[in-house]
Image (spheres, helix red, strand yellow):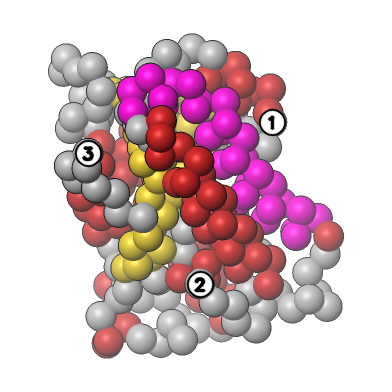
């Protein structure tokens, strides 16, 4: 495939990130970033045009090194994330720290180092947030705090970069059939039924809609919810 459009997707090894990378690959050369080289290589092999970057998102030097090789970037998707559930009493400082480092600080730093490339292409930043980026429930303190902060970052960046032609979209899915959802259901002591929730491909469809929107408009914030039969998600 010959294309001049480029996309960069974090968390592309599974779940939402993998679905987004596959959807963007129809029209973009896709940079895949994650820590599992085997999973990234497997995905890259089936995409029309892709390359793999193995990196720890909490390592600013690694991110800067990757960004240094990208001159123009049309789409930057932040999909990587970690989930630590537990009460304030039970979650330890290391879990809070990882929640903030991976879910907030890594997207901030990666965006910062890629801003020159995004500005050259009048590109778009898409942040995959969560329904828990709007509200907090018992046990979600660390996760919700990180997602609230990510939403605040998106809102600020949208205003800061508007004059540079960079659009910013924050997508807040409800429960999605992913390994993270399995982890959450296990913590809740409830069965996992992937057929009851949003499919990763549906979130990817929303990303494509935001990317394909005419340049005179932007989807700032978008919520995606499961249908009522799946409303065991509080």
Q: Assign a secondary structure to mark 1.
A: loop
Q: CA distance from mark 1 to mark 3?
A: 33 Å
Q: Assign a secondary structure to mark 3.
A: loop
Residue 66 location, quadrant = top right
Q: Residue at x 69, y 22 (%)?
A: 61
Q: Nearer the viewer, residue 163 or 21?
A: 163
Comparing labels 2 and 1, the label whose residue is closer to the camera: 2
Is 180 displayed left or right of 141 in the figure? left
> What residue sits right under mark 2 in the picture?
134
Neighbour tally class for label 3: few under 14, some 14-19, many 20 plus, Cα within 10 Å: few
Is 144 displayed left or right of 195 in the figure? right
Is 40 displayed left or right of 137 in the figure? left
The mark that comes first in sequence, 1 or 3, is: 1
Q: CA distance from mark 2 to mark 1?
A: 28 Å
Comparing labels 1 and 3, the label whose residue is closer to the camera: 3
Q: Is residue 206 magenta?
A: no
> What residue sits right under mark 1 in the picture?
59
Residue 178 location, quadrant = bottom left
Residue 149 location, quadrant = bottom right
Q: Is residue 119 magenta?
A: yes
Q: Are marks 2 and 1 in contact (CB under 8 Å)?
A: no
Q: Residue at x 53, y 49 (%)?
A: 156
Neighbour tally class for label 1: few under 14, some 14-19, many 20 plus, Cα within 10 Å: some
Comparing labels 3 and 2, the label whose residue is closer to the camera: 3
Magenta region, residue range: 94-122
> What residue sits right under mark 3 in the picture?
215
């Amino acid at each position: 495939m010959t294309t001049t459009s480029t996309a960069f997707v974090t968390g592309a090894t599974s779940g939402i990130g993998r679905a987004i990378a596959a959807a963007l690959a129809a029209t973009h050369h896709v940079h895949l970033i994650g820590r599992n080289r085997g999973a990234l290589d497997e995905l890259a092999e089936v995409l029309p045009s892709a390359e793999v970057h193995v990196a720890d998102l909490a390592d600013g030097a690694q991110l800067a090194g990757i960004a240094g090789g990208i001159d123009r970037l049309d789409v930057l998707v932040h999909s990587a994330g970690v989930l630590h559930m537990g009460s304030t009493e039970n979650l330890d400082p290391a879990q809070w720290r990882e929640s903030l480092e991976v879910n907030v600080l890594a997207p901030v730093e990666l965006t910062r180092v890629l801003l020159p490339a995004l500005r050259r292409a009048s590109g778009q930043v898409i942040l995959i947030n969560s329904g828990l980026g709007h509200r907090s429930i018992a046990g979600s303190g660390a996760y919700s705090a990180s997602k609230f902060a990510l939403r605040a970052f998106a809102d600020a960046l949208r205003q800061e970069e508007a004059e540079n032609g960079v659009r910013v979209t924050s997508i807040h899915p409800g429960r999605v059939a992913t390994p993270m959802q399995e982890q959450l259901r296990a913590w809740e002591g409830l069965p996992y039924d992937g057929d009851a929730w949003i499919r990763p491909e549906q979130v990817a469809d929303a990303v494509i809609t935001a990317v394909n929107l005419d340049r005179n408009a932007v989807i700032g914030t978008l919520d995606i919810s499961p249908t009522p039969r799946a409303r065991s998600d509080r």
